Amino acid sequence: MTKLIYYAGALLLAGAISACSPLSLVNAVSPAGAVEATTALRYGADPRNMLDVYRPAANADKAPVIVFFYGGNWVSGQREDYAFVGRALAARGFVVVVPDYRLYPQVRYPDFLIDGAAAVAWTAREIAGHGGDPAHIFVMGHSAGAYNAAMLALDPRWLGKQGLKPDMLRGWIGLAGPYDFLPVQNRTTQPVFDAPNTPPDSQPISHVGAASPPALLIAANKDNLVNPVRNTGGMAAKLRVVHVPVRELYYDGVTHTTLVASLSNSLKRLAPTLDAVEAFVRSDGGRK
């Protein structure tokens, strides 16, 4: 098993597993441990409106809740590939929701945000039955998923469609998120956001306000896909201007892709991402 873990880490560090490829190898070296999973729960009408819930096996009761959105440039991804995220965070005492959402070319911006808001609304309604505390929900994501989390936390339009407001969230966590990317340069992303006619209000950084939830922003210093200075640094600076609590972390030894892999119990040696997320949630977004 030790050799398999080392091999998985080596592949990731070499870039053999891309952000939008299956992460089955990471799951294979990330044992479930004392965690229970309830899979294929429906939160909407579309076939992709499904989610999985991970919880500590030791009878979670009113545990903090994390809704995790995966990346994949809004064109790929499936919740099963991110079981390692659910397991790792549930092992730390949290209830974790990992939803699928509609992708391009089935939909374009902003339909995946409508799905994300519906997943959060399902969580608020149903998570108590899985041991979670609906009064302590955080949204989190990596890459495109961090964009989704940011928009749900900052732009009231999306949760508003579900009769909710961003202030129902205790905080949001972004890993290598694109928060300020106009004009859209990535050719895969351009049709998702109807470039060059992308609306300016599609950018999370445009929606920062004094009432925004606290944030934990993490990026890799060596990220060749999403500029960490412009996106993570720019978002953190904008939040500080309006006095919103924000913790900003940059790690060496990981890339855009391997940053999310460092959440795995087996690959957490890559960066202290898991510890930082746990500390942020345990502190109730810095309120404690």
Image (cartoon, helix red, strand yellow):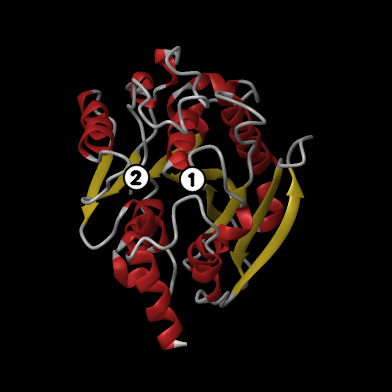
Which residue is depicted at the point 46% across and 45% down? 140
Circle 1 crowding by C-alpha within 10 Å: few under 14, some 14–19, many from 20: many
Q: How many marks?
A: 2
Q: Amino acid at mark 1?
A: Gly
Q: Element type at marker 2?
A: loop
- Classify residue 154 as left or right of residue 47: left
- In the image, residue 276 lies at what x, y percent? 32, 57
To which residue does mark 1 refer? 71
Q: Is 21 located above or below residue 165 in the figure? A: below
Q: Amino acid at mark 2?
A: Ala
Is there CB contact under 8 Å for labels 2 and 1? yes
Which residue is depicted at the point 27% across and 29% down? 239
Q: Is 114 located above or below residue 279 in the figure? A: above
Q: Is 5 located above or below residue 158 in the figure? A: below
| Mark 2 or 1, nearer chain start | 1
To which residue does mark 2 refer? 176
Observer-nearest residue: 112 or 209? 112
Q: Which mark is residue 142?
A: none
Q: Element type at marker 1?
A: loop
- Classify residue 254 as left or right of residue 84: left
Which residue is depicted at the point 61% across and 61% down? 54
Observer-nearest residue: 251 or 216? 251
Which residue is depicted at the point 42% across and 15% down? 196
- In the image, residue 266 lies at what x, y percent? 42, 75
